Amino acid sequence: MQTHISTTPFGRRPMTLGMISSQVTARAVPKDATVHKWRVFQDIKDARIALGATDRALAILDALLSFHPDTALYGDSELIVWPSNEQLIRRANGMPPTTLRRHLAVLVDCGLIIRRDSPNGKRFARKGQGGEIEQAYGFDISPIVARAEEFKELAETVRSEKKAFRLVKERLTICRRDIVKMIDAGIEEGVPGNWGRVQQAYQAIVGQIPRTAPRQTFEAIAEELEGLWAEVREALESFVKTQKMDANESRIGRHIQNSKPDSKSESENGLGDRGEAGGNVADTDNVRSLPKRELPLGIVLDACPNTLWLVKGGGGIRNWREFLAAVEIARPAMGISPSAWEEARTAMGDQQAAITIAAIYQRQDQINSAGGYLRSLTDRAKAGKFSVWPMVMALLRAKLDASKTTGTGTGSEAAAVDLETAGKIVRTESRLEISDALRRSLDKPGRGS
């Protein structure tokens, strides 16, 4: 007894090696194999490009699988479905007949289905007297079972590649963000380095990033960026370590000063990067013992004569307003950022911050990073461990020492300079209360005496 379930002409189709290979694979399926058809279909979707299948072809395969009543597919069962073209078109969302035929051929070429042609080229099933299907002609989906493990491995490879691609894109994004932030920090903090060159190198690497490319291309660019990232990071870390070492040396110097009254104080050594970098309880006590009144403008200008170079027209500085205007010219010239200047003004007050910058400007040739040094002093000022008095007095002492070590050290010129500067210090002392430690520092004989 023969029952026609569906009749659809196939026409004459050539046999290909791919079809033969698929049939061989289907015959080799283990009889005890069992797969979940929709899980295998998900693997096929993920491995679509590797298999050479198209989106439309997978839509047809989805429809074909839906014609099989069971979710589980067994290796020892008949796995043939025989829907008509009309039924497939409806379940494939209204696909045109020509498109349907073309993508059915794609499924066959990819080895995802096998055609089981009837003698007259039509799809149908023949049932026995008991109603069971004895013979069916249509599309054999047994490759879904036979190649399930292969599809799974291909899908896992594709998923791993997608993950690796996503990770390298994340590496690029994070690396680009970090490099930009580190370059900004280096410029802002005045870290020594050719930041213009670093910026150009960064732009050159980033300019190589394509919109679409294989993962290996992005990997190579990511490695270049990470190399630049490591270079910039090392420069910043080295600067931070140097600052910490300078701070430690500063604390050691103060300890020696406290235990040896006759030794030269740290403040007298000038305004190097470690001059005010550290601090402890003794530092705080020393600051508290310094005069509370403000330094006279004349003393500040005598200690920081280079500030006068900044006055337009070569005129003098007659008041604190003109002094602040001169300092505003020195600040950007030394690379001190507006944020560092504003923070110093908030912590110290306008006048004290201006004196600090004038002192730094006086000895800028001995300071690697004026901006970083100012921030260090600002932090100490916030903790109550900083005063401009030692800085100014150290500059005055250095001026006295310099006059004695020059060629005119024994002549009347040196004596006049000593007398003029010392007179200003004495006049200041007579009007202000100063600590014994500061007085001893000022009264100590210079190196050239």
Image: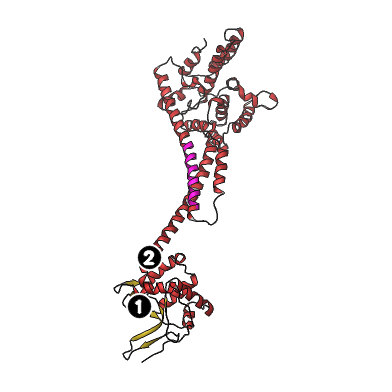
Residue at point 40%, 63% (across, down): 154
Q: Quadrant of residue 301?
A: top right
Amino acid type, residue under disc 1 in the picture: Asp
What residue does disc 2 label? 152
Looking at the image, is mark 2 or mark 1 earlier in the sequence? Answer: 1
Say which quadrant the N terminus sits in.
bottom left
Residue 297, how many percent across, how many down? 60, 23
For label 1, the SS is loop
Residue 389, how many percent across, how many down? 52, 23
What residue does disc 1 label? 70
Q: Is residue 269 above or below residue 172?
A: above
Looking at the rendered structure, the number of numbered marks drawn on it comes to: 2
Main secondary structure found in the magenta portion: helix
Residue 137, how many percent across, how many down? 40, 83
For label 2, the SS is helix
* Front residue of this view, candidates 323 and 40: 40
Residue 138, how many percent across, how many down? 42, 81
Amino acid type, residue under disc 2 in the picture: Lys
